[in-house]
Amino acid sequence: MARTVPRLPEVLRRPRRRPADEKARPRAARRALPLPVRALAVLVAFACMVAFAVVLARITLQPSPASVPLTHSNLHPGRSLRECLEQASAREAIRQVGGNLVLGMPFGVLVPVLAPRARGVLQVLALTALVMLMVELVQGALVTGRAFDIDDVFLNTAGALLGWLLLGRRLGRGVHRRVRGPSAE
C-alpha cells in the first residue's frame, strides 16, 4: 500500500519574487558614503592617529631618571598587575590600569577607519599588540627610568578591544561599507 504525501498549496510552494525595479535598487544599508565624506573621515582619522602617536611618544618614551632605582622589567604576564593591585593605593592602581587601557583605545577606533582591510577585531588586536610591544621594547632598552612590562602590552591591547567594540567597528563599517551588486544578494 503506497502512502501519498499531501501536496502544499501552490502559494506556499513558489518563492516570493521581488519586482524587477526592487532588485536593481541597492538597499540603503549597503550604500557607500559619498567619496568626499569618506575621504574627509580618513583624513580626520589620520590627523588623530598622528596626534595620538605624538602623545604616545611623549607619555611612554620620556626619560624618568628619578625612577631608575624603582624600575624593573616584567616578562611574566600578570605579575605587575598583581603587585599594583596589592601594593599600590586604589587611586594609583586605577591610574595605572586605566591609563594603559585608555592608551590602547585610539587604535581600536582609528585603525578600522584608516585600514579597511584591518578593520576586523583580530587584525586590530594584532596590530595594537605589535605596536605596543615595540613601544615597550624601546622603553626598556633605550629610555632611562623606564622598563619593559608585558602587562602594559596586554592592557593596551584590551583597550584597543574596548575602543573597537564601542566605536571602531561602527566607524570602520560606516566609512568603508561594502557595496554588493544585485547578483550577490
Image (cartoon, rainbow, N blue to C red):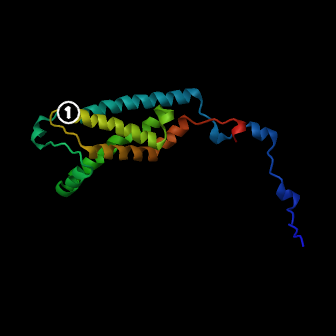
User: Toward the viewer: 37 or 27?
Assistant: 27
Residue 69 coordinates in the image, percent (x, y): 9, 41
Q: Residue at x 49, y 43 (%)?
A: 169
Q: How many marks?
A: 1
Give the image quarter of residue 103. Answer: top left
Q: Is residue 143 left or right of residue 54?
A: left
What residue is shown at x 54% (from left), y 30% (from top)? 38
25 lies left or right of 14: left
x and y percent of residue 75 in the render?
A: 23, 45
Disc 1 marks a residue whose amino acid type is Ala
76 sits left or right of 51 in the view: left
Q: Is residue 161 left or right of residue 155?
A: right
Q: Residue furthest front?
A: 1
Choose between 43 and 10: the one closer to the eye: 10
Mark 1 highlights which residue? 141
Coordinates of residue 68 in the picture (x, y in percent): 11, 38
Quadrant assignment for the C terminus:
top right
6 or 180, nearer to the observer: 6
Would residue 108 be seen by someone viewing this image from the given angle? no
| Farthest residue, direction right | 1
Sort mark 1 into few (<14), some (14-19) or many (20+) by Cα contacts within 10 Å: few
Residue at the image position 39 percent from the left and 32 percent from the top: 48
* Residue 60, image quadrant: top left
Q: Is residue 82 visible?
A: yes
Residue 53, by quadrant, is: top left
Residue 72's place in the image compared with 115, above or below, is: below
Q: Position of residue 167 (x, y in %)?
A: 46, 43
Label 1 SS: helix
The N terminus is located in which quarter? bottom right
